[in-house]
Image (cartoon, rainbow, N blue to C red):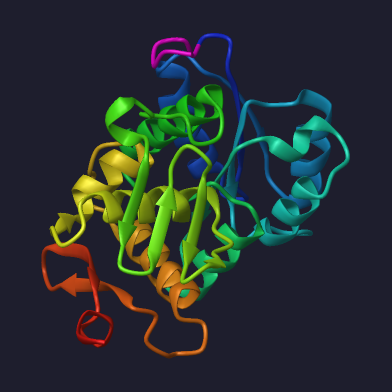
């Protein structure tokens, strides 16, 4: 699917605020998407199962069933609807709320208030990834292969990451982010660069998606708080880089 192939794509917009549903619908329809809506969690599940949309824009705070509950039920559904991409909307600023949504199976999140152009850009990027299949977006020759940083090995072709022989259980975006950092080991990558390379959309002012995923990766690299031999360093005001730790380098 190209970015212009949106005329046969349907997006379900779920929000209990009518103005948000109307704003999303207006901009998505201008891009050629068909739009259907729901205003609570129960209706969202019913519409999703009946209409099989190509993507769901899902508010976190909903009447009857929350966005968390809707995501959980969709991801455990026995039908093909379990694989529908979900872009979660949230007015909450706490990372934990966003992490829970991502861990339940949301593909991305967008904080309120948001720019409508960013909404359409993210919808297109998510659908592009879905059409390409898991891990295949931007998977050109330069993005394949095996990348090693100290005890860390990221195998792009097999979509496997190990640390000192321990398999890392990573979600798709976590894996792709780690691969990007491993490929450019020791080099600072800005949040904007990571958004474009890993998530596939331009920078619109919200880069917390990157920060949330970096924090998740850090926990998985060092679940016991010890020194795993590699670290994702924060370069304040710029971005992140993956490096071997001094303990590993001198050991």
Q: Quadrant of residue 63?
A: bottom right
Which of the two residues, 191 or 154, is positioned nearer the viewer here?
154
Whole-percent x, y for residue 184 in the image: 20, 51
Q: Quadrant of residue 125?
A: top left
Whole-percent x, y for residue 109 in the image: 47, 52
What residue lies at 75% left-to-right and 56% top-to-bottom?
A: 72
Which of the two residues, 109 or 34, is positioned nearer the viewer here?
109
- Relative vertical location of residue 108 with respect to residue 140 in this rendering, above or below: below
| Residue 80 visible to the viewer | yes
Q: Quadrant for the C terminus, please.
A: bottom left
| Residue 109 visible to the viewer | no
Please identify the residue farthest to the front as the structure is shown: 251
Residues drawn in magenta: 1-6
What residue lies at 33% left-to-right and 78% top-to-bottom?
A: 229
What residue lies at 28% left-to-right and 55% top-to-bottom?
A: 181
Whole-percent x, y for residue 161 in the image: 48, 56
Number of numbered discs: 0
Whole-percent x, y for residue 85 in the image: 60, 37
- Relative vertical location of residue 201 with respect to residue 51 in this rendering, above or below: below
Tell me, yes or no, whether the highlighted magenta stretch contains residue 10.
Answer: no
Q: Main secondary structure of the magenta part?
A: loop
- The answer to whether residue 192 is left or right of residue 25 is left
- The answer to whether residue 222 is left or right of residue 107 is left
Please identify the residue farthest to the right as the structure is shown: 78
- The answer to whether residue 192 is left or right of residue 161 is left
């Amino acid at each position: 699917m190209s970015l212009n192939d949106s005329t046969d794509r349907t997006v379900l917009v779920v929000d209990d605020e009518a103005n948000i549903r109307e704003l999303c619908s207006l901009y998505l329809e201008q891009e050629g998407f068909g739009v259907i809506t729901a205003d609570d969690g129960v209706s969202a599940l019913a519409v999703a199962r009946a209409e099989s949309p190509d993507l769901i824009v899902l508010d976190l705070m909903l009447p009857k069933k929350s966005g968390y509950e809707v995501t959980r039920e969709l991801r455990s559904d026995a039908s093909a609807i379990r694989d529908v991409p979900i872009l979660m909307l949230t007015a909450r600023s706490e990372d934990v709320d966003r992490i829970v949504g991502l861990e339940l199976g949301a593909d991305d999140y967008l904080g309120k208030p948001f720019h409508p152009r960013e909404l359409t850009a993210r919808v297109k990027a998510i659908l592009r990834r879905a059409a390409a299949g898991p891990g295949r977006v931007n998977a050109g020759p330069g993005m394949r292969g095996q990348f090693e940083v100290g005890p860390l090995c990221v195998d792009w072709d097999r979509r496997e990451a190990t640390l000192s022989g321990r398999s890392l259980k990573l979600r798709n975006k976590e894996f792709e982010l780690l691969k990007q950092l491993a490929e450019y080991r020791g080099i600072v990558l800005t949040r904007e660069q990571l958004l474009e390379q890993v998530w596939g959309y331009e920078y619109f002012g919200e880069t917390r998606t990157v920060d949330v995923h970096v924090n998740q990766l850090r926990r998985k690299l060092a679940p016991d708080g010890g020194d795993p031999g590699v670290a994702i360093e924060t370069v304040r005001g710029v971005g992140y880089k993956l490096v071997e730790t001094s303990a590993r380098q001198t050991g």
